[in-house]
Image (spheres, grey):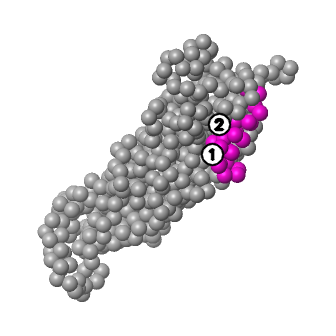
């Protein structure tokens, strides 16, 4: 996934769409908006980011999970098998992005990139509702996918790459 | 100036610390597990060395509390789980990359073995004990025949258990305070020290008591050495780890850590132990309780402070 920080207006539509699509319990969320302000008035610079699980290639959550409930799906998406999760919290403690939460039903929950929609050929809920079309989703292994092409063109960054997790959500800057 | 705000609603443990995922259950278990590992280590060690009759307190008497410690610890772990009815999923896989997985397996092995060990020495406490069933009597004879072999298995498992309580935390690179390999040996040493302290209470002779006072003293010195190394490593590392160390060097955990863990849990009992060895009259229980208290506080502080330390982005 690639997210254009220049186009994002921080409207939180993606947050609400995700909560609705995935039946996220009230008070919880799988994605959220961060507003970063740099500088002193009147020279201010704002960066808006829609953040979520980074579906890292070297996921500490998958590594730490004692039962294999947290795992990589084919294609690299990180998901949790609810019936295998014992709710020990190791993955929550291991995530540098704090992208996971303990669902009131006991298991651990997080962004799945709307796997159930992708399998039907749809885009994740957050991507499809974004009013500024600032999110790009696709297969990073495919050099001709929309997301690969935009990453070739635009300057981008990932969040705390120094944590060694190889995050797969890219922010266009 | 740089300001970061989460503008959409979000449950966040860095804003509301009560949302932290691990509460009292994990540090309590880490302490009980470490203590059990410490007691079993010395029981197995002196059996293997053939000094069982010289140190009966360590080999035969102290391990009686181990099954209780382990079961209490396992119960605390169970309470920590949020999806409790699925706990058996732990035993459907072995994941070598996950310390929690092989810790769960090590516990699965060492808990019954500790019960066997207690059963082998039950006459130490109840001289007229009768197993009633022939099968159990035969099993006891068999177990006693292979006592040294069992001791070897226990000593290996107890070291795994002791180190695992530390490695469990150091595997999390998201929490810079935990993300140091010193935590493994440090927790092992702390567990051995707590184990030696408890054995002092069960010691059967002055000689045995003095041996374990000396052992505990040595372990406390090693612990202090490892803690120094821990902070040296942090302060020479990246900014997130310097921040983590600063939680104890001026930050909010400074007073509890240095007062409860280092002074009351290590330095004062060490001084009392030296006085005991110099034949001053000091109630045996005081330094023992202080060492155990230091061990408990150490784990609570590391677990809670660790969850506050984080990467910044």
Find out whether the residues at labels 1 and 2 contact each other: C-beta distance under 8 Å: yes
The magenta segment is A8-30
- Judged by its main secondary structure, the magenta piece is loop
Q: Point out the residue furthest to the top here.
A: A153
Determine which of the numbered discs, if any, sits on residue A125 in the image.
Answer: 2
Residue at position x 58%, y 20% in the image: A146
Determine which of the numbered discs, if any, sits on residue A22 in the image.
Answer: 1
Q: Is residue A46 above or below residue B217?
A: above
Query: Tag 1's secondary structure?
Result: loop
Give the class, few, some or many, for how many residues have Cα within 10 Å of label 2's Cα (few <14, many ≥20).
many
Image check: B127 left or right of B173? left
Counting the numbered discs, the total is 2
Residue A159, image x, y percentages: 59, 28
Looking at the picture, tell me which residue is in the foreground, B221 or A158: A158
The Cα atoms of the two marked residues, 1 and 2, are separated by: 9 Å
Pointer 2 chain: A
Q: Is residue B37 above or below residue A92?
A: below
* Res. B208 visible in picture: no
Residue A47, image x, y percentages: 73, 25
Query: Tag 2's secondary structure?
Result: helix
Chain-order first, disc 1 or disc 2: 1
Quarter of the picture containing the N terminus of chain B is top right
Determine which of the numbered discs, if any, sits on residue B267 in the image.
Answer: none
């Amino acid at each position: 996934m690639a997210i254009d920080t220049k186009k994002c207006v921080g409207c939180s539509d993606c947050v609400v769409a995700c909560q609705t699509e995935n039946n996220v319990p009230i008070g919880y969320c799988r994605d959220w908006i961060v507003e970063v302000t740099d500088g002193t008035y009147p020279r201010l610079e704002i960066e808006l980011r829609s953040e979520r699980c980074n579906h890292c290639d070297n996921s500490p959550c998958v590594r730490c999970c004692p039962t294999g409930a947290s795992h990589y799906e084919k294609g690299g998406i990180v998901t949790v098998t609810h019936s295998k999760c014992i709710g020990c919290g190791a993955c929550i403690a291991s995530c540098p992005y704090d992208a996971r939460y303990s669902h009131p039903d006991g298991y651990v929950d997080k962004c799945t990139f709307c796997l159930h929609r992708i399998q039907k050929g749809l885009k994740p809920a957050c991507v499809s509702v974004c009013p500024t079309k600032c999110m790009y989703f696709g297969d990073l292994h495919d050099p001709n996918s929309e997301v690969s092409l935009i990453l070739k063109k635009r300057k981008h960054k990932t969040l705390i790459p120094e944590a060694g997790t190889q995050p797969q959500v890219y922010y266009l800057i | 100036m740089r300001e970061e705000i989460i503008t959409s609603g979000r449950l966040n443990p860095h804003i509301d610390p009560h949302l932290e995922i691990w509460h009292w259950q994990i540090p309590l278990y880490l302490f009980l597990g470490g203590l059990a590992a410490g007691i079993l280590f010395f029981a197995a060690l002196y059996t293997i060395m053939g000094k069982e009759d010289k140190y009966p307190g360590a080999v035969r008497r102290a391990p009686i509390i181990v099954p209780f410690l382990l079961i209490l610890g396992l119960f605390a772990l169970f309470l920590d789980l949020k999806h409790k009815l699925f706990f058996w999923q732990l035993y459907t896989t072995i994941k070598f990359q996950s310390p929690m997985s092989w810790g769960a397996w090590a516990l699965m092995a060492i808990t019954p073995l500790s019960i066997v060990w207690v059963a082998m020495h039950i006459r130490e406490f109840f001289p007229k004990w009768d197993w009633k069933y022939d099968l159990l009597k035969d099993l006891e004879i068999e177990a006693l025949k292979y006592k040294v072999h069992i001791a070897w298995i226990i000593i290996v498992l107890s070291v795994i258990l002791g180190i695992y309580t530390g490695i469990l935390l150091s595997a999390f690179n998201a929490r810079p305070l935990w993300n140091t390999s010193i935590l493994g040996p440090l927790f092992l040493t702390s567990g051995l020290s707590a184990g030696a302290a408890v054995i002092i209470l069960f010691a059967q002779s002055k000689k045995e008591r003095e041996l374990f006072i000396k052992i505990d003293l040595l372990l406390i010195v090693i612990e202090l050495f490892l803690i120094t190394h821990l902070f040296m490593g942090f302060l020479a590392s990246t900014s997130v780890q310097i921040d983590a160390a600063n939680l104890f060097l001026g930050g909010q955990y400074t007073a509890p850590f240095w007062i409860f863990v280092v002074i009351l849990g290590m330095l004062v009992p060490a001084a009392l132990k030296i006085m005991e060895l110099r034949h001053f009259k000091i109630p045996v229980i005081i330094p023992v309780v202080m060492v155990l208290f230091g061990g408990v506080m150490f784990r609570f502080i590391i677990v809670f402070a660790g969850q506050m330390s984080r990467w910044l982005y």
